[in-house]
Image: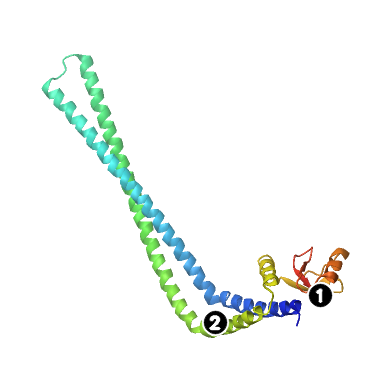
Amino acid sequence: MDQMNLLWAYQAEDMKADRLEREIRRSPLRQKMENDRTQYMEKQKQHKQIQDQVAQMGDRKDAIRDALTRSQDQLNALQKRYEVTPPTELEAVRAMAAEVNRCLDTITRYEKELEKIAERVRDCDKRADAIRREGARLRAEFEQLKAQFDEQYPPQKAALEKQRAVVEQKKAEIDPVLLEQYLSAKKHITPPLSRLTNGQCSGCNTSLPSAVLNQLRNADEKTLVACESCGRFIIKG
């Protein structure tokens, strides 16, 4: 058998193997497993994002507490100064009162921000807990589905492995250069080979121009000619 017919026979077995693999991938049980796994990974991502948010709020709380300590120290210093050397002039009293008020306003603003942060942290904790519960449910469901899938999968896997072995056997008979072209074309279109039928590409049913037909007529058994319309390599006969 010449190289072109060997390549055509290889494609037939390769397509059978691909169909078996698609049937396994597209089984409702497998799709449900994949969906659960995708959702579980998304829950993990969401949980990590919440943890990062809580950590950032923790850093902000620490910074606010430090600022509160400084403001309280400043307020205490003002009070002590007032007790030791109370101002006698009206302007000095007003100036000291203004400083006290600024300290009190700052302390109040920081305390309110701490309250808001505490509220946001509680909200994050609730969301994180809900995400953990949902993640645990998805993981348990995935494990249950996987157990069912593992019971059904061995016969399908055996059939696929058997077919892949046939493909490998056919591959050994084909020129490596032709095989590389076949595999490269398969990345873009499947099946990558078509037949020449009544001057047309059997893959897309497009009539081939005379230049392509001449290439096919003059090509040797190791030269592949592509359809200008669909990109498949055309096998004569």
Please tell me whether mark 2 or mark 1 is closer to you in this view.
Answer: 1
Position of 25 compared to 141: left or right?
right
- Answer yes or no: is residue 207 visible: no
Depth order, front residue of 32/210? 210
The image shows residue 109 at horizontal and vertical percentages of: 31, 36
Q: Counting residues from the N terminus, which is met first, the one under dot 2 or under dot 1?
A: 2
Colouring chosen for the image of the structure: rainbow
Position of 162 compared to 87: left or right?
right
Question: Local crowd at mark 2 within 10 Å, few (<14), some, or many (≥20)?
Answer: some
- At a point 60% along the width and 75% down the height, the residue shown is 22
Q: CA distance from mark 2 to mark 1?
A: 35 Å
The image shows residue 95 at horizontal and vertical percentages of: 24, 19
- At a point 37% along the width and 52% down the height, the residue shown is 52
Q: Name the residue type under label 2.
A: Lys
SS at mark 1?
loop
Position of 225 compared to 120: left or right?
right
Which image quarter: residue 94?
top left
Residue bearing mark 1? 236
Which image quarter: residue 193?
bottom right
The image shows residue 236 at horizontal and vertical percentages of: 81, 75
SS at mark 2?
helix
The image shows residue 66 at horizontal and vertical percentages of: 25, 39
Depth order, front residue of 30/159? 159
Asked if residue 154 is positioned above or below residue 35 in the image, the reply reads: below
Which image quarter: residue 3?
bottom right
- At a point 49% along the width and 80% down the height, the residue shown is 149
Q: Quadrant of the N terminus?
A: bottom right
Residue bearing mark 2? 157
Question: Local crowd at mark 1 within 10 Å, few (<14), some, or many (≥20)?
Answer: some
